Image (tube, rainbow, N blue to C red):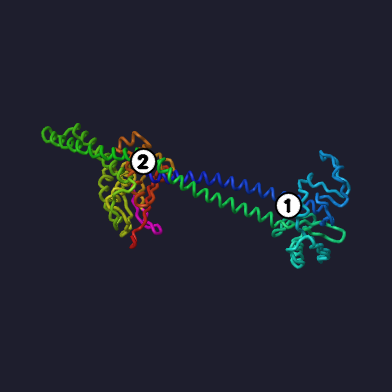
Amino acid sequence: MIQKLRRKIIAISMAAIAGVLLIILGVVNLINCRQTDAETRQRMAFLVEMGGTLPEAFDGRGRGPAARPESDTPPDGTQPPADGEYDFRRRGLSEETPYEMRFFTVTIKGGDITATDLTRIASVTEDQAKEYAYDLWKKGNTDGTEGYYQDFRYHWTEQEDGTQVLFLDCSRERSTVRRFLLASALISGIGLIIVFALVLVFSRRAVKPFAENYEKQRRFITDAGHELKTPLAIINADVDVLEMDYGESEWTNSIKSQTGRLSELTSRLIFLARMEEDSPQITLIKTDFSALAEEACESFRPLAKSRALTLTQDIERNLFVNGDKAALRELINILIDNAVKYASENGTIEARLGLSGKSLLFTVENTASGIVPGPHPEFFERFYRADASRNSATGGSGIGLSAAAAVVRVHKGKITAEAPDETRIVFTVTLPLWHENQ
């Protein structure tokens, strides 16, 4: 149980940290992508405004050949630029932008390429430029359309001599985005590994107080149970002596009944404590589950009959599991005993055993009254009482099903309780079948 608690702490901690890192990673990369896209959009707008070309000469400050002297520019930058001057800063661009861009244009008229301009790029041949343009042309919707083609941003513009598609090389920006994504993911992954190692170390310290308290509680239950067995046995012996001397009476019968309940409760508590150890001392061998189920049904049949209950069975023979024989017998007895105790008046109990794929499926169904339809995992909680007065009347202790769940857990199986309707409750146990390699 402590190991299970520790695994939950590690899982929850790692899930929370991974979730936060994933959100941060996503937001940072999304911002980076949007910023990069905005920059390429600004550059494309500049090229479109320039007609898909650039002036032949710049004076080193991003101004055209007709720029005015530096001394004529107001220091606050509010005066409109002179003829031939392009205001880069107002558009969020650098004055070095024209010298950093690589682009080319292709003009198409009537489905035929009439012109290509590759003077501002060296990595693309004329055949490649035509291929890119044709691919986009086939997709249609060319009027003002803008988007990405491979590592290029493109823009269609209608002109007098045809439709021009402008390709802006964004390979460097997109490569930077991909490298940033990869680097941030790698760093996050390394960070998660480091955090996992730290959580693994500190989780042991975190659960240590719980482990110590749980071990003390388990030891107390075991020791107290063994200590109670002796006085209970003496009380029963004394009652037998009293009955020999004075005869049987309602008082001696009451004493026997209550000591019997205490003995059963003590045995179940000790059994439960043993099953919930991190490494329970059990012997796993090839066990005939079918034989155990038939034996339990036969032993409970007289008790069921005395309470006007009908106990039927449908047990498939020769179904074996790898388990502890005593623990599995206790599991079956707990389920059938529970059904006998809580079945409705003149009701029925049915025990079934069969195969479900590669697993053994054992179910115990009994009639009930006033039960809420649906699954009932709370039945397996310690000392759970759906109806305290009824439990008291039937002698239930509230730990039998907890012990059954512990046995199933030790045998790597699954147990459920479900009410198909308001008149029935079904307990289902699934256990892996025995095979030669075990």
* Position in image of residue 270 (x %, y %): 28, 42
Give the quarter of the figure containing the C terminus: bottom left
Is 155 in front, or is 168? 168
* Position in image of residue 405 (x %, y %): 35, 46
Left or right relative to 360: residue 119: right
Q: How many labels does the image show?
A: 2
User: Is disc 2 surrounded by few (<14), some (14 to 19) or many (20+) residues within 10 Å?
Assistant: some
C-alpha gap between disc 1 and disc 2: 59 Å
Q: Which of the 4 quarters of the picture holds residue 115?
A: bottom right
Secondary structure at numbered mark 2: helix
Secondary structure at numbered mark 1: helix
Q: Which of the 4 quarters of the picture holds residue 203?
A: top left
> Which residue extends farthest bottom?
127
Q: Above or below — where is 95 with respect to 171?
A: above
The segment highlighted magenta reads 348-361
Left or right relative to 319: residue 108: right
